[in-house]
Image (cartoon, rainbow, N blue to C red):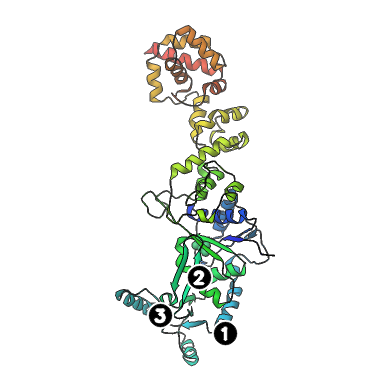
């Protein structure tokens, strides 16, 4: 029996997750969902100073909110744990011992200053920066003597010489790197902490990850990781490096250019399915432009449809998906979504009708505040356009309208039309402006019953009185 496809998301909990990271999680989740595989969540918290428990909690909540359930790893457990790198130090030490025993790693006593000088010299002569190999062939007694002198050391991985490392990137195709250009690299720092290359590759192998989709910024790490896994005779996952997300100017998406954390998106009122649909199309092509649920997004997910060019973030596109999600949302969800913003203005008994009335006129809950006030507030805001319309409409129009008022807007408007002779814009605009203070908005047949006859009459008459005072 072949083992199932296993993809993973391996975030470092050093901050809240943003678009770029969460898209990586989404692609991995869609890939495993598509083939009924396993999606694993590993917490890469080796940087003790920057990793925080609250960020781990937040990213679990964020993934759950987006519907990206994982079947193995953080919180859910599994046979191949622990799933936090901070709990795996003994695992890393154990495999390091076997690398040491085979002479595949060696201690390096070079100081930071020495390494910097060497790097500068290489740069001046146009060479790529790589370790000179100074400590690669120290004799055991030399090593002992340096340790006895208390000189701190790192551990370097001995890269095979004069070889090339080839791999087929799932997104970028065939990749070839010369081992000599990479040189020997550090896998354990002098403070005893492990480098990313080592723990990340080792964990993928030990956790039987078969597919790694991650940011393009990790592409050049891959030959190092493959070399480590080859040295340990461990399985190598298939890697695919996805394009980065850039802003309108082509620069990497940053907080300044509009990148929002998942928590911010949630607080603004984005629907998770809107975010999923947008992100799934950011650097990945779907035939369909319909809003899809996660199963449909997974079914249509193809590694071959991942683009190599940078993916451009466009807020208007995100809002487009928000609009589609909003139209599909059921009334109960819509009510919950609006509750925090308009709950204090809209009476509970009206909430469902109000939600349906404003569904097509809002993108976010805060947009509904204007309509809640337009309907329920005694001091509703009046737009400049509405004021102009009110000013150019004769008092008699409102007086007659107030006498003909009834809850059924269609019938009411017909009666006002018959009585005043006004029609089209001249009929509907003054009615809307007087009743809601706006010249556009939710459909009046839905709005008028919520305003109620008493309040509506007062609003119509207010313009009669105001004009008389003028
Ligand atoms: N912890 C790494 C990161 O957040 C994981 C990279 C990878 O997916 O291999 O960048």
Instruction: Say whether disc 3 or disc 2 marks the residue closer to the N-terminus.
Output: 3
| Outermost residue, bottom side | 141
Residue plotted at (57% across, 38% down): 337
Q: Which residue is mark 2?
A: 197
Q: Indicate the secondary structure of the residue bearing disc 1.
A: helix
Q: Which residue is mark 3?
A: 111
Label pair 1/2, CB-CB below 8 angstroms:
no
Q: Nearer the viewer, residue 68 or 307?
A: 307
Question: Residue 225 in the image: x percent, y percent?
Answer: 51, 71
| Outermost residue, left side | 124
Q: Residues within 10 Å of mark 2 (few under 14, many from 20)?
A: many
Question: Residue 461 in the image: x percent, y percent?
Answer: 47, 13
Q: Residues within 10 Å of mark 1 (few under 14, many from 20)?
A: few
**Which label sits in the foreground, 3 or 1?**
1
Marks 1 and 2, Cα distance to the nearest angstrom? 20 Å
- Whether residue 264 is situated above or below residue 55 in the rendered picture: above
Q: Nearer the viewer, residue 281 or 131?
A: 281
Question: Residue 390 in the image: x percent, y percent?
Answer: 40, 17
Q: Indicate the secondary structure of the residue bearing disc 3.
A: loop
Instruction: Say whether disc 3 or disc 1 marks the residue closer to the N-terminus.
Output: 1
Label pair 3/2, CB-CB below 8 angstroms:
no
Instruction: Say whether disc 1 or disc 2 marks the residue closer to the N-terminus.
Output: 1
Quarter where residue 113 is shown: bottom left
**Which label sits in the foreground, 3 or 2?**
2
Q: Which mark is residue 101?
A: 1
Horizontally, residue 179 falls left or right of residue 445, namely: left
Marks 3 and 2, Cα distance to the nearest angstrom? 21 Å
Marks 3 and 1, Cα distance to the nearest angstrom? 25 Å
Horizontally, residue 438 falls left or right of residue 1, namely: left
Q: Residues within 10 Å of mark 3 (few under 14, many from 20)?
A: few
């Amino acid at each position: 029996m072949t083992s199932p496809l296993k993809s993973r998301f391996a975030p470092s909990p050093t901050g809240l997750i943003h678009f770029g990271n969460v898209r990586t999680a989404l692609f991995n989740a869609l890939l495993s969902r598509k083939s009924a595989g396993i999606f694993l969540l590993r917490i890469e918290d080796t940087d003790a100073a920057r990793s925080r428990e609250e960020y781990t909690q937040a990213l679990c909540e964020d993934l759950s909110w987006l519907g990206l359930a994982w079947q193995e790893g953080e919180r859910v457990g599994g046979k191949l744990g622990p799933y936090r790198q901070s709990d795996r130090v003994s695992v890393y030490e154990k495999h390091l011992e076997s690398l040491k025993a085979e002479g595949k790693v060696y201690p390096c006593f070079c100081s930071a200053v020495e390494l910097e000088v060497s790097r500068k010299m290489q740069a001046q002569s146009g060479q790529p920066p790589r370790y000179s190999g100074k400590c690669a062939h120290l004799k055991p007694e030399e090593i002992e003597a340096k340790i006895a002198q208390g000189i701190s050391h790192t551990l370097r991985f001995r890269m095979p010489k004069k070889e090339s490392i080839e791999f087929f990137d799932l997104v970028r195709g065939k990749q070839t790197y010369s081992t000599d250009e990479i040189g020997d690299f550090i896998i354990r720092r002098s403070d005893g902490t492990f480098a990313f290359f080592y723990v990340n590759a080792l964990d993928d192998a030990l956790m039987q990850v078969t597919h790694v989709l991650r940011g393009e910024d990790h592409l050049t790490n891959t030959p190092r990781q493959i070399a480590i896994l080859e040295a340990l005779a461990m399985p190598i996952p298939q890697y695919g490096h996805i394009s980065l997300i850039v802003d309108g100017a082509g620069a990497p998406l940053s907080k300044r250019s509009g990148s929002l954390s998942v928590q911010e998106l949630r607080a603004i009122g984005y629907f998770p399915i809107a975010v999923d649909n947008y992100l799934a199309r950011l650097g990945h092509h779907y035939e369909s432009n319909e809003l899809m649920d996660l199963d449909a997004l997974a079914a249509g997910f193809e590694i071959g449809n991942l683009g190599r060019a940078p993916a451009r973030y466009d807020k208007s596109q995100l809002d487009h998906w928000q609009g589609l999600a909003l139209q599909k949302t059921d009334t109960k969800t819509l009510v919950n979504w609006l509750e925090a913003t308009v709950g204090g203005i809209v009476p509970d008994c009206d909430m469902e009708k109000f939600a349906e009335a404003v569904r097509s006129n809002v993108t976010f809950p805060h947009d509904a505040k204007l309509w809640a006030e337009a309907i329920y507030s005694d001091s509703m805001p009046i737009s400049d356009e509405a004021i102009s319309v009110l000013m150019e409409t004769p008092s008699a129009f409102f007086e007659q309208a107030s006498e003909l008022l009834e809850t059924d807007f269609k019938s009411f408007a017909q009666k006002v039309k018959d009585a005043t002779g006004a029609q089209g814009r001249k009929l509907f605009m003054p009615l809307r402006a007087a009743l809601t203070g706006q010249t556009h908005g939710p459909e009046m047949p839905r709005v008028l019953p919520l305003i109620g006859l008493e309040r509506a009459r007062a609003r119509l008459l207010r313009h009669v009185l105001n004009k008389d005072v003028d």
